[in-house]
Amino acid sequence: MCGIIGYTGRKNAVPVLISGLHSLEYRGYDSAGVAVIEDGNVVCVKSQGRISDMEALLEARCGGLCSHTGIGHTRWATHGAPSDKNAHPHGTELVHAVHNGIIENYAELRERLAALGYRFHSDTDTEAAVYLIDYHYRKTGDPMAAISAAVRELRGSWAFGILFADKDGELYATRHESPLIVASDDTGSYMASDVTALMDYTNQYIRLDEEEIAVLRADGIRVFRMDGTAVEKEVQAVTWNRDAARRGGFAHFMLKEIHEEPEAVRKTVGSVVHDKIPAFHAGGADIESIGRASHIEIVACGTAMHAGLIGKRWIERFSGIPTTVEIASEFRYSPPIVEKGDLFIAISQSGETADTLAALRLAKSLGMHTLSIVNVVGSSVARESDGVIYTCAGPEIAVASTKAYPCQLSVLYLLAVHLGLSRGKITRQEATSLVSSLVQDVPEAIEHVIGRAEEIRAAAEKIRHSEDIFYIGRGADYFLAEEASLKLKEVSYIHSEAYPAGELKHGTISLITDGVPVIAIATSRTLYDKMTSNIREVRARGAYILLLCGEDFPEPEAIADTVICLPALAEELMPMETATAFQLLAYYASVLRGCDVDKPRNLAKSVTVE
């Protein structure tokens, strides 16, 4: 993985590829490369580092290069360390390809292909797949037959963009368990792993399904099954503005996306609430059967999993349905005891998270009813679920997820209210009141927090040089602390950990020394006295206390060195605005430390491998 772009048509392909790669930077990468056809030969330039490094190398080697057919790639290492030799594209004299995914049987393929005379120059799994396509192409002379024969021998996941040196004016695309789209305009045809790469050229695209092959030419695109049967494909429209994928005047995408949270929440809530109560139209799902679930299993990764933990509390509180939350990569190896009527909820911003998708497939095989909460329409998780609820966050370009989180929380909150109402646990009047608080108060509260950015930046100044930071909380605040700690680690590279405040005395307090920051999240009025005691414990041992609490809480200055007061909301809704505060704290800590805010090291936006 990480990003694929391809073009064939009447324009010079080189600037199209470079522009597309820059549009895919948000996915995270460690190297970049392009391959284009010129006079029947393939020119391939690739390097470790930034796209700009590869551009400079391309200019130095091939200044003024003009080609009408090419592919490009940004790589995030999965097999083989980041290096020039492991960067994509990989190829032979006849075939070059870019690849997202993991070829699980690459070792045996390498051994077999080496015995046939192929020499390997990288440590990647991709090279074996490319050589396999080359092998079949030399046997058949037919690109479609070669690709079809090769992928039948592969195990794992893949999205391939392929060019053949003697087929100038043609590109080939195929996928299995890794996303890939194709599109065309009046100049030619494109392929990409993400619609963001195509937004400068077209707002319509075709999403390839499993094991289809797309043939791209200047005059259009044809899609076939592996047996050569033509397939009629639905053209989908991009609903995001082209400028939505730009920074819009902000210093970083992460800051821009935090500022977009109030509107994202409004749109998400507005898409669900009708006549003052939740009215889900979950992509054809039987929403009433969802309300009859006897047990709910929420599965997700990272930020989405942290949203699920808070959602569990709301679902159990409002509906009384026992709910568990599992990390997707663990769920597959400890599946639950399933009974008829159990509901599986998958949460994924991209809808392409490999572990979440694998868990979803396992849940379906176990007979569970499946529902997904995703941000990308038509994504794999959405398409493979029985029902889907879309968040309306719009594209997230920064690697660290921000605005998707309060949108996921909003959907989970409304789903909890719906379940409670459908099961008779809450009245319509109570449901209306709960929803009204979300609709009217939360976006405004988030705007208020954003308006205090300079105060939060000043707090970040106090922790910017720290090597270790501890987050503490109780109840839902502990789950917020988990997400806050993740955000800080992701973008500032400060080591941080989150703990339930009541667990400090069971071991963690031994790590508290003079000046160590402890960030306490205390948004629960019912737990505030308990939190106060925990804060005093660590402060007595020299900790520097940064407290996030409601503005109506009593005397926070008496227990903390720095206080960030949050607008008063109903207790169950406090996580929404608190998230904005700790996201800004992480952002400013990253900026002040000189980190690459939008593209943190070693991270990828869309984790499409297991």
Image (tube, rainbow, N blue to C red):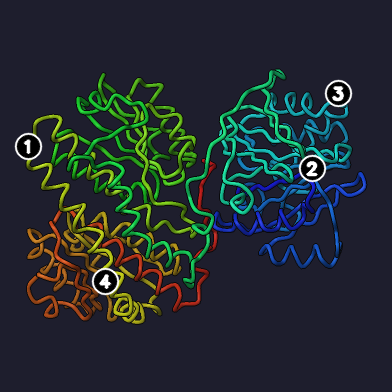
* Residue occupied by mark 2: 96
The percent position of residue 555, horizontal first and vertical second, equals 9, 77
Mark 4 surroundings: few (<14), some (14-19) or many (≥20) residues within 10 A? many
Q: Relative to the observer, which residue lies in front, 113 or 601?
A: 601
Name the one closer to the observer, 549 or 503: 549
Contact (Cβ within 8 Å) of mark 1 with mark 2:
no
Badge 4 amino acid = Val
Asked which secondary structure carries label 1, the reply is loop
Mark 3 / mark 4, whichever is N-terminal: 3
Comparing labels 4 and 2, the label whose residue is closer to the camera: 2
Image point (9%, 37%), residue name: 428
Left/right placement of residue 388 relative to residue 210 reads left
State the residue position of label 4: 518
* Nearer mark to the viewer, of 1 and 3: 1
First in sequence: mark 4 or mark 1? Answer: 1
Helix, strand or loop under label 4: strand
Which is nearer the N-term, disc 1 or disc 2? 2
Answer with the quarter of the image where residue 290 lies.
top left
Question: Could you tell me residue 40's position as x and y percent?
Answer: 91, 44
Indicate the amino acid at tag 3: Thr
Name the residue type under label 2. His
Asked if the residues shown at circle 4 and circle 1 are in contact, with their CB atoms under 8 angstroms apart, the answer is: no
Task: Say left or right for 176 vs 125.
Answer: left
Q: Position of residue 331 (x, y in %)?
A: 38, 35
